[in-house]
Image (spheres, rainbow, N blue to C red):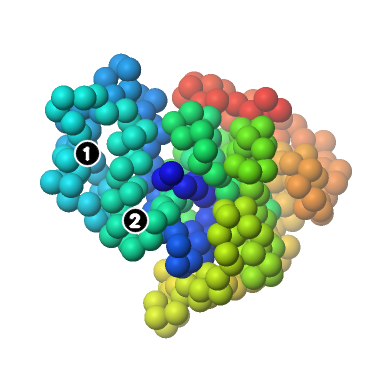
Amino acid sequence: MNPYVFIVGCPRSGTTLLQRMVDAHPEIAVVFETHWIPRWFEKRRGLTPEGYVTPKLVGRLLENRRFKHLKIGREDLERLISPSEPVPYASFVTDIFDLHGEVAGKHLVGDKTPAYVRSVPTLHELWPETKFVHLIRDGRDVFLSLKNWSKTGSAAGRFATWAEDPAATTALWWKWNVRLGQEDGNPLGPDLYHEVRYEELVSEPAKACEALCSFLGLPYDEAMLLFHEGRERTDPDLDAKKAWRPVTAGLRVWESEMSAEEVERFEAAGGDLLDELGYPRTIPHPSLRTLEVSSRVHCSFTEDLRSQCHRLPERW
């Protein structure tokens, strides 16, 4: 049943690379960042209180800029709604993914939306058999990717503590995303939840893809490593994503690109998760001053999450 898989992870962890690799497989298409699926269900946008689809939802989708990537027209969308029988939201979205599969010429369809790492319970409620692939990356490289990103304000940069301490704020934001993904995903069991390390994906892509295909119940196909062919752009000013470069290790190296102060501040705030994931710390014993700043940032960041009605991980 579609959606067959959700590729999730803390934003700036390399989920676009993974999406392109899986989408290149001849049996599965992966939609690029819908963003609306769990949110509209939870807020009942275009739905009845019981979760059935109304005609308003069709209008909302057609106005949504991300929905246009699915290449589904109004007539096909309207046909999914029955005037005589209520259509559950889950069935409606499944039909949408099936239609996209027809367009893509593939029978399986997944979705890559990093932020869905915080929505696993809702998605599992809607589709109990859907799989989740959680991409995890060293948070210090996530910080480097985020630091000069034009959309930082939609990620860790939207928190009040960013102005005071971007490194510690990113560490907490990274930890918030990764912990929620793990705490919600692990109980689903190995048939439905699979973790991929970014570092392994770029250093041993064939091995990582073979393991991923085994989890997805698909035969490994070398096309996954050739996703870039015919799409590469030679403009030297483009980053790896926009240039459609092949799998490339070492695009960011926090050891040489982060200042000592940034490393200390990041590790003071996110060192416990670095330890759990096996990413060695550079500064295992931060200064008292750094720890005091980290504690203050943690309290403010947590208050921000609560004021915005965000869920906190159990281990926070």
- Residue placed most toward the observer, 94 or 10: 94
- Residue placed most toward the observer, 116 or 233: 116
Q: What residue type is labelled 2?
A: Gly
Residue 45 relative to residue 192: left or right:
left
Tag of residue 101: 2
Residue 295 relative to residue 174: left or right:
right
**x, y percent for residue 214:** 63, 57
- Residue placed most toward the observer, 84 or 277: 84
Residue visible at 39% across and 77% down in the picture? 231
Against 289, residue 312 (above or below) is above
Q: Which amino acid does label 1 sit on?
A: Leu
Residue 133 visible to an observer of this rendering: yes
Residue 251 relative to residue 127: left or right:
right
- What crowding class fits label 1: few (fewer than 14 Cα within 10 Å), some (14-19), or many (20 or more)? some
Mark 2 vs 1, N-terminal side: 1
Against 253, residue 44 (above or below) is above
* Quadrant that contains the N terminus: top left
**x, y percent for residue 244:** 45, 73
**x, y percent for residue 50:** 32, 17
Q: Is mark 1 on a helix, strand or loop?
A: loop
Residue visible at 55% across and 70% down in the picture? 221
